[in-house]
Image: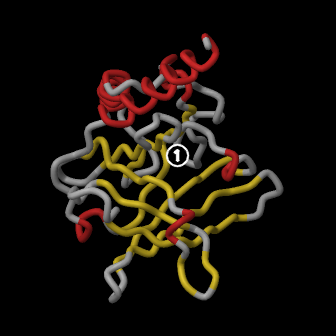
Amino acid sequence: MTKYLILILTFCSLSLKSIAIETVPELDLDSYKGLWHEIGSIPQSFSKDCTANAKAEYNILESGLVQVLNSCLENDGNINVAEGRARLNPEFNSPSKLEVTFVKFIDWIWSFSGAYWVIGLDKEYNWSVVGHPDLTYLWILSRSPSMDLEQLYEIRRDIEAKGYDSCQVLMTKNDSNAYTGQERLCDL
């Protein structure tokens, strides 16, 4: 019985975390499109071979879907590119709660999509923070390959207030910064 109670409480606490994550109130996809550099992220299995220069490029297609092109430099020196599609999540009435899929078989398969919630955004669209409502994903993106430390401190405070562990966020190595890819946001 105790085991089931712990399981139920754990599920409820995860559900509450998901509900508590606030996204930005407005997101203009025309302003959001274009090239973004990854400044830091919570590492994921699908990006384990990425060692530097992670980028995302978003383009709005005639269909209204957003073309997603993610790229990074791998250990072997090759550039890895993954193409996907994003759209407004039909479950929510929010422009900043999108879903993205990288699975295609004849057409894009939305049942394999993941949450892409914009939880932080510069008013001029110079930087963005993208997260997942269960706190397992997070990316800090910037229009330029580096970001001011004061801005990173502000982002750190904001994501910690939303429940993220900033020590899980690793800084991304690229040609314009001194990070090795092992520095944690909480240690800056």
Q: Which quadrant of the figure has residue 89? A: bottom left
Q: Which quarter of the figure is the N terminus placed in? A: top right
Question: Where is residue 181 shown, x and y percent of the image?
Answer: 64, 35
Question: Where is residue 23 shown, x and y percent of the image?
Answer: 26, 44
Which residue is drawn at the image coordinates 51% and 22% (left, top)?
10
Q: Is residue 144 left or right of residue 122?
A: right
Question: Which is nearer the eye, 162 or 71?
Answer: 162
Q: Residue lying at the far front in this picture: please name it.
A: 1
Q: Is residue 168 left or right of residue 81?
A: left
User: Which amino acid, mark 1?
Assistant: Ser
* Looking at the image, residue 96 lies above or below residue 185: below
Question: Where is residue 32 shown, x and y percent of the image?
Answer: 29, 63
The tally of labels here is 1
Q: Residue lying at the far right in this picture: please name it.
A: 76
* Looking at the image, residue 100 lies above or below residue 50: below
Q: Which quadrant of the figure has residue 15? A: top left
- Numbered disc 1: secondary structure: loop
Question: Where is residue 183 shown, x and y percent of the image?
Answer: 59, 26
For label 1, the residue is: 176
Q: Residues within 10 Å of mark 1 (few under 14, many from 20)?
A: few
Which residue is drawn at the image coordinates 26% and 67% (left, top)?
29
Which residue is drawn at the image coordinates 56% and 27% (left, top)?
168
Question: Which is nearer the eye, 156 or 62?
Answer: 62
* Looking at the image, residue 155 lies above or below residue 102: above
Colour option used: secondary structure
